[in-house]
């Protein structure tokens, strides 16, 4: 049974006219009549007598009317309560650390979608974020596109290259680019597993027949850049991060043959929310670029 069938039945009973009930509900009369026929068929009982002046409830219809009216009132109250709850419950957004640091802040400043506030949760891997999304702990996530399944609504936001980061005194200081094969013997600093970038570095170096020379594993955060600046080794990071190290004693070179780029997408379970987020992000960037 469908709640619209109940609403059509109750309004028809009140109006004692199918045409008046249809008008009150902004339905066509054939649509309303179909609702009532479906309800009668489902209940296997006749609810109305057709008369020359309109319609009247049968005895069974009277009994059903008396029982269904308070049910509809309760459903309406529940809907209103849940709508109020939804308006005060934040939209939970999940993001990778690099995106939360360098990409999202100017794009989600002041964001309030569906008349709701927003919270931001940072997790270290796209897999963790997708899992949190699927389990309902998050409403939308910003992740590596390769982790997004077909069951989710998603939209690609951008793609970027990987860069190698060196201390200022490194012998590659005069170079414009670097090849991945040239980095395989370098002392490499990476984030602790699990980590999307670490996984890609290992995969790409192994595809060249090399085992990465990992000399240090660090926790997530800018400490990895501090370790490179101190001369402990080099690291490999996405372009988004590499473009934001000008304040450090470091330089970054694009890796010409890394073998893959990082593609970033927004993913949600709700197409409506996804489209709103995408539109807000796009609009905020356009607005800031014209100022």
Image (spheres, rainbow, N blue to C red):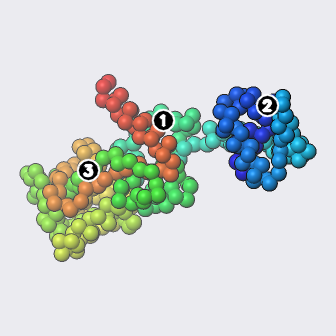
| Label ID, residue 160 | 3
Measured from the top left, where is residue 175 in percent x and y? 9, 53
Residue 72 image-quadrant placement = top right
Eye-nearest disc, 1 or 2: 2
| Mark count | 3
User: In whole angstroms, how far apart are the C-alphas of marks 3 and 2?
Assistant: 64 Å
Is residue 49 visible in the rendered image? The answer is yes
Q: Secondary structure at mark 3?
A: strand
Q: Which mark is residue 111?
A: 1
> Residue 80: x, y in percent?
71, 38
Q: Which mark is residue 17?
A: 2
Q: Is residue 151 left or right of residue 211?
A: right
Asked whether, in this view, residue 25 is left or right of residue 143, the answer is: right
Q: Pointers 3 and 2 in contact (CB under 8 A)?
A: no
Cα distance in 3D space between marks 1 and 3 = 25 Å
Question: For mark 3, does the 10 Å Cα neighbourhood hold few (<14), some (14 to 19), or many (20 or more) residues?
Answer: few
Q: Tell me the CA gap for discs 1 and 2.
A: 48 Å
Percent coordinates x, y for residue 185 in the rendering: 16, 70
Q: Residue at x 14, y 66 (%)?
A: 181
**Which element is circle 1 on?**
loop
Please give the name of the residue rendered at 35% of the width and 59% of the height, measured from the top-left corner: 146
């Amino acid at each position: 049974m469908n709640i619209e069938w109940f609403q059509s039945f109750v309004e028809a009973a009140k109006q004692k006219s199918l045409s008046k009930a249809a008008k009150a509900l902004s339905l066509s009369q054939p649509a309303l009549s179909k609702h009532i026929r479906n309800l009668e068929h489902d209940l296997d009982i006749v609810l109305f007598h057709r008369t020359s002046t309109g319609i009247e409830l049968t005895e069974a219809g009277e009994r059903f009317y008396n029982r269904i009216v308070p049910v509809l009132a309760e459903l309406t109250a529940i809907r209103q309560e849940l709508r109020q709850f939804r308006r005060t419950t934040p939209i939970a957004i999940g993001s990778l650390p690099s995106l939360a640091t360098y990409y999202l802040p100017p794009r989600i400043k002041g964001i309030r979608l569906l008349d709701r506030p927003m919270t931001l949760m940072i997790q270290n891997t796209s897999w963790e974020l997708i899992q949190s999304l699927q389990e309902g702990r998050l409403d939308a996530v910003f992740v590596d596109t390769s982790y997004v399944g077909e069951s989710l609504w998603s939209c690609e936001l951008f793609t970027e290259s990987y860069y190698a980061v060196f201390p200022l005194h490194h012998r590659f200081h005069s170079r414009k680019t670097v090849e991945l094969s040239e980095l395989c013997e370098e002392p490499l600093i990476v984030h602790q597993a699990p980590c999307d970038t670490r996984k890609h570095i290992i995969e790409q170096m192994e595809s060249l027949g090399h085992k990465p020379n990992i000399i240090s594993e660090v926790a997530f955060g800018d400490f990895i850049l501090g370790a490179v600046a101190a001369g402990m080794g080099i690291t490999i990071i996405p372009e988004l991060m590499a473009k934001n190290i000008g304040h450090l004693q470091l330089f970054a070179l694009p890796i010409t043959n890394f073998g893959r780029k990082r593609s970033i997408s927004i993913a949600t379970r709700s197409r409506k929310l996804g489209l709103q987020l995408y539109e807000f992000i796009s609009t905020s960037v356009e607005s800031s670029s014209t100022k």
